[in-house]
């Protein structure tokens, strides 16, 4: 899953080591450090994403909830069509 937000651009994939964990990856360490403690972020070997953090699924769900609560709806555009 790819997520773009004001916090940055991240990729979320299943962990190969643990089915209950995910790996949250980013090209830039700063994109992850806005969401997680910088001490947890590790360099990873990937052609695009150079930094990652292993995280349990529940902690990631909590992180997504925090991100959703920070949405600024005043920044949304008005649609040109209406949906019935």
Image: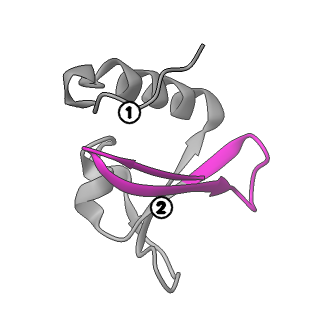
Magenta highlight on residue 53: no
| Residue at x 53%, y 30% (from the top left corner) | 59
Residue that badge 2 annotates = 25
Q: In this view, does 60 lie above or below 65?
A: below
* Residue 21 lies in the magenta-colored region: yes
Q: In which quarter of the image is residue 29?
A: bottom left
Outermost right residue = 19
Estimate the x, y position of residue 9 in percent, counting from the top left: 37, 57
**Is the residue marked by circle 1 packed among few (<14), some (14-19), or many (20+) residues within 10 Å?**
few
Q: Please, what is the dominant secondary structure of the magenta stretch?
A: strand
Residue closest to the far bottom:
47
The disc placed on residue 29 is none
- Residue that badge 1 annotates: 80
* Residue positioned most to the top: 84
Vertical placement of 20 versus 38: above or below? Answer: above
Question: Which of the two residues, 24 or 76, is positioned nearer the viewer here?
Answer: 76
- Residues packed near mark 2 inside 10 Å, few (<14), some (14 to 19) or many (20 plus): many
How far is disc 1 from disc 2 in space, using C-alphas? 35 Å
């Amino acid at each position: 899953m790819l997520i773009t937000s004001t916090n940055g651009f991240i990729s979320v994939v299943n962990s190969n080591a643990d089915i209950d964990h995910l790996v949250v990856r980013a090209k830039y360490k700063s994109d992850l450090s806005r969401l997680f403690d910088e001490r947890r972020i590790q360099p990873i070997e990937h052609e695009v994403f150079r930094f990652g953090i292993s995280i349990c699924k529940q902690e990631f769900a909590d992180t997504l909830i925090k991100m959703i609560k920070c949405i600024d709806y005043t920044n949304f555009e008005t649609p040109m069509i209406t949906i019935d």
